[in-house]
Amino acid sequence: MGEAVEFYHANGNGFSKFSEKFDPKAVVLLNGSNHIERDTDSSWYEETIDDDLKWSFALNVNGVLHKGTSEYQEIALLDTKRFGKVLMIDGKMQSAEVDEFIYHECLIHPALLCHPKPERVFIMGGGEGSAAREALKHKLLDKVTMCDIDQEVVDFCRRHLTVNQEAFSHHKLNLIINDAKAELEKSCEKFDIIVGDLADPVEGGPCYQLYTKSFYDKILKPKLNHGGIFVTQAGPAGIFTHKEVFTSIYNTIKQVFKYVVPYAAHIPSFADTWGWVMASDEPFSINAEKMDRRIEERIDGELNYLNGAQFMSSATMNKTVSLSLLNETHVYTEEDARFVHGHGVALLKSQETGWGNCCTAKKEVKKNGSFYSY
């Protein structure tokens, strides 16, 4: 048997800790590979994807680079071997250094490029700053409003996610610390683009309210200018996971907007294909060539993932997902919701990383007008 290790497992009161002897060979079952380095300093992060599926990845020697606690949630920045720096919120992966550009380019640029002349953008959530960073690449924009409820998360990301430091200090960024739902309700301003960079609907709290028909219809849509576009992340969209929330979010938005476009891309650090939904009351009249022209004309700098052909491809679903979207009947309401499965769990093979109890497995977090339960 190998060295003594500490495990952090979820229970109703947070993480319980216990130590036991551990056979390094058993780690093979955690990361799904045929072999692994038997480094006594090796640490692992584990996230539950489903009841019978977990996603594990190795940490570098430093393990936890930074950690902090806000009024609402606990934050950590991990140093992983495969994905670089990884931002964790309450034990759940938010983004990874090496591939977050895929998620954020797909979230931001299609809507901005489909709009004839976008000038004002409102981002719900987005505290890490990556969505704002991508939006600020657009020369036509006069103002990007980012509204996140958690000052501590914003300050943490401003300090430690160096790739976004320029975006946080940009003169076009209007950073608001507030409940995004309440901010939209009270605002007299309208926007060309509204972005939902929100956490997934998770069982255990009413976070799904930000994905409901009533929210879209009564609060969000009235804040769009004529011809405005709404886009939101819509959860896992893989061949086995798309029915969790993706098809429901799509069908709910269809009840509110005339033209709705689902699209998806693979995110390696998420271990799945991810989905987004874009909607408007005006048709999306754009092709690959026109999108490429607009990228060249409108965007300051290079995109690493998105071009016209890629977007057109991402909006073409495989047969199984297409049929599910076509046949979906569920609509998100306050009384009837679907949820994404799973939450993050920290598993350490060494006591030297200093992780402690920096993550909470079951904690209700009030964020953007809802309680997020991890």
Image: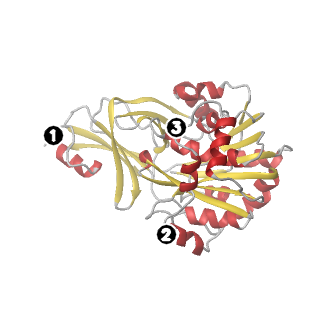
Q: Along the polypeptide, which appears first: circle 1 or circle 3?
A: 1
Q: Can you say whether 171 is above or below 90 in the image?
A: above
Type of amino acid under label 1: Gly
Q: Position of residue 93 (x, y in %)?
A: 47, 44
Mark sitting on residue 225 = none
Disc 1: which residue: 2
Q: Which of the two labelled residues, at mark 3 and mark 2, occupies the earlier sequence position? A: 3
> In front here: 239 or 20?
239
Q: Residue at x 71, y 45 (%)?
A: 180
The residue carrying pointer 2 sits among few (fewer than 14), some (14 to 19) or many (20 or more) residues within 10 Å by Cα, namely few
Residue 115 visible in the picture: yes
Three-letter amino acid code at the position of disc 2: Lys
Q: Are marks 2 and 1 in contact (CB under 8 Å)?
A: no
Q: Disc 3 on helix, strand or loop?
A: loop
Q: Position of residue 217 (x, y in %)?
A: 77, 61
**Farthest left residue?**
1
- Amino acid type of the residue tagged 3 in the rendering: Asn
User: Mark 3 = which residue?
Assistant: 304
Question: Residue 319 shows which numbered tag?
Answer: 2
At x 42%, y 47%, the residue is: 268
Q: Nearer the viewer, residue 198 or 13?
A: 198
Question: In the rendered image of this protein, does residue 204 appear above or below residue 168?
Answer: below
